[in-house]
Amino acid sequence: MDLKGKKVLVFGSGKSGIGASDLLARVGACPVIYDGNAEIDKEAVLHKTTGDYPLEIYAGDLPKDVQDSLDLVVLSPGVPTDLPIVKSFYAQGLPVWGEVELAYQTGRGEVLAITGTNGKTTTTALLGKIMSDARESVFVVGNIGTPYTSKALEMKETSTTVAEISSFQLETIEKFAPKVSAILNITEDHLNRHHTMEEYIRVKELIVKNQGPEDACVLNYEDEVLREFGKHIVPKTIYFSSVRKLDEGIYLDGDMIVLKLNGEEIPVVKTTDLKILGQHNHENAMAAIAMAYFAGVPMESIRKSVCEFTAVEHRIEYVTEKNGVVYYNDSKGTNPDAAIKGIQAMIRPTWLIGGGYDKGSSYDEWIQAFDGKVRCLVLIGQTKEKIKEAAERLGFHDIVLCENLEEAVKFCAAKAQPGEAVLLSPACASWGQFDNYEQRGDMFKEYVKSL
């Protein structure tokens, strides 16, 4: 779509919305910002934009004459597509895009896109390093922290964009077509938004919607949904596995990652040479290696980059050691499956801080994964009673409830013995007590360092 002169409603006044509005103005469109919250400070929103274009801002209600005059709607990732007003846009026949679609249609070059319930950020950061070491013009964008829209106009035909894509962003794609895509895994998450696992799976699988036979999709062979999905897609399927040798694909053979293609086995790297810990990170590495290889990066270059890569902040991140107790920040463990990976990586008796915003998850599998490692479960946030009830039902009774994260850190520090660990791995979103998981992780590190 040629956006010049088009009147475009940007739904959402946060970081993504501001980025979309600025981008639209720069390509000659006429953006209008709308936020469903009638209490937003319009002046503050205006100050966050570049300020060099006229901008109407509406809050609470959207006037009918404004809606009738629109050519396109761009939804911020946090806006559900089943809201009555969004349904009215569809009924009106308006194209409804997300931030990813807008950036894709205004950007250039090839795209490598990663989705999945867990592991996205580490895989995106690792692939971003591999590509940046191998190519001149690389952008690492999406949920990893840099809005895709903020970089779109800097992209050239020779650019490579490595994008972390959420299920929310995939709901609103139209032409978005990565050269190489990956779905790392699919486990229960965001059911408060997607309502059923079937819908969540359907949305995740949209990442291959516009890929052709010349493209590739990297999938987790050990995820039954994805193993079956890989049999019926248009792009070339590349499986990875951390538990078995594959006839074709990338897998772990002892401590060696091996890529097997057309009967030829290519030893890639030993896991002992990696700076990232745990089986889940070996899976993330395999996915990134396969994506880079099918994007045309020489194996020698991939090998060097992978060995240099260090862990992502907030993902089983070593913070410090105090009085013989080691502290780890896994604030990015925002759902039970991600938090299971955090506990599995622990090799010391662990004081576990969990709880937060309720996304409608079940905590049984997380609690069952404690496997004798958890000395005490210290709970905070909206879900603390729900998790306590689940833990006690499953026979785990070493539980303490705290008012906030600072209190939880102080309690663990007072009780933990030398040789033990304190792990923040909440299994819940941060909302309610924090703006995002990064803020939660930063506060944890601050509290720990001030002990």
Image: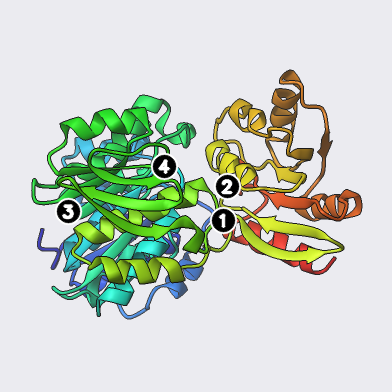
Is 177 left, or right, of 190 in this rendering? left
Q: Position of residue 175 (x, y in %)?
A: 15, 50
Q: Nearer the viewer, residue 46 or 130?
A: 130
Is 362 left, or right, of 296 in this rendering? right
Q: Amino acid at mark 4?
A: Ser
The residue wearing badge 3 is 71
Q: Nearer the viewer, residue 254 or 184?
A: 254
Residue occupying image coordinates x 51% and y 58%? 40
Distance from the alpha carbon under mark 2 to that under mark 4: 21 Å
Distance from the alpha carbon under mark 2 to that under mark 1: 7 Å
Q: Amino acid at mark 2?
A: Gly
The residue wearing badge 4 is 242
- Mark closer to the chain start, 1 or 4: 4
- Are the residues at dot 1 and dot 4 in contact (C-beta closer than 8 Å)? no
Q: Nearer the viewer, mark 3 or mark 2?
A: 2
* Badge number at residue 333: 2
How crowded pointer 3 is (Cα within 10 Å; few <14, some 14-19, many 20+) is rated as some
Q: Secondary structure at mark 3?
A: loop
The residue wearing badge 1 is 315
In this rendering, the answer to whether 161 lies above or below 52 is: above
Is 340 left, or right, of 150 in this rendering? right
Q: Residue lying at the far right in this picture: please name it.
A: 414
